[in-house]
Image: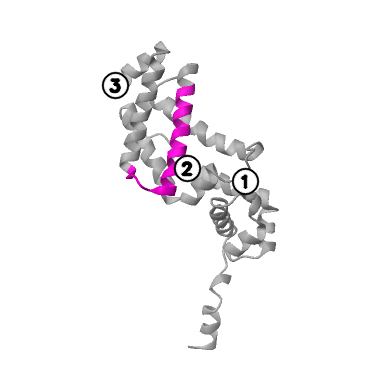
Amino acid sequence: MTPGKSAETARPARRRLSVDRRREELMAAALELFSTRDAEDVSIDDVASAAGASRALVYHYFGGKQELYVAALKSAAEQLESRLRPQEGGRPLDELASGLRRYFDFVEEHATGFAALLRGGPANRAGEIGEIVDGVRLRLFRLIQKQMNVEEPSPVLRMTLRSWIASVETAGLDWLERRDIERPTLEKLLVDHMVALLGVAAAHDDDVARLLERLA
């Protein structure tokens, strides 16, 4: 092996990366850490070490830990929301099942991003962090509303759908921790859960009762 080739192979970590690619690597490292530890317990040095970068480089791209945390969560949220774009053409419950499959595709493929998005961070989710998480929930809500062909949900339906979304989030986190149920079974369970919640709500709201008849 020539000296030139030896020097090249000795520096794989110093390959030149585009600005976007380097930012992605730093955010991926941050998501990995934020998904298992509280944001307050993760330092810039931790992120730099996990990404194989310098502390100065992290500050150069993000300015500080809060900026990095917000950018990483935004990245995870954007990836998830891209999976939730409506794919029209089927019955509402079939469309709901399809949306759940795409949702859990993301959960499985981007476990750290999903966990960091919904579990990581300070207990008080005010400001930008709360806006990111609420944005994902709003996207889910609007997707379901569109699939059910509901223009303006009643208070009972609104609370029912928001309760179901919270259940889906909890189920996703539980499944990541344990993986003791097959994904198709979990997805079918959540569709049935929606129908059951609508059945309860229908006893309190005529509009929901008519919606349930349509879905059935």
Q: At 36% from the left edge and 14% from the top edge, which residue is drawn?
A: 210
**Front one among 79 and 18:** 79
- Estimate the x, y position of residue 40 in percent, counting from the top left: 66, 50
Q: For residue 124, what is the image quadrant? A: top right
Q: In this rendering, would 5 be left or right of 193?
A: right
Q: Amino acid at mark 3?
A: Ala
Secondary structure found at label 2: helix
* Disc 2: which residue: 80
Q: At 59% from the left edge and 66% from the top edge, which residue is drawn?
A: 52
Dot 2: within a 10 Å radius of its alpha carbon, few (fewer than 14), some, or many (20 or more) residues? many
* Disc 3: which residue: 216
Dot 1: within a 10 Å radius of its alpha carbon, few (fewer than 14), some, or many (20 or more) residues? some
Q: CA distance from mark 3 to mark 2?
A: 29 Å
Secondary structure found at label 1: helix
Q: Nearer the viewer, mark 3 or mark 2?
A: 3
* Disc 1: which residue: 70
Q: Are marks 3 and 1 in contact (CB under 8 Å)?
A: no
The mark that comes first in sequence, 2 or 1, is 1
- Estimate the x, y position of residue 26 in percent, counting from the top left: 58, 58
Q: CA distance from mark 2 to mark 1?
A: 15 Å
Q: Is residue 73 visible?
A: yes
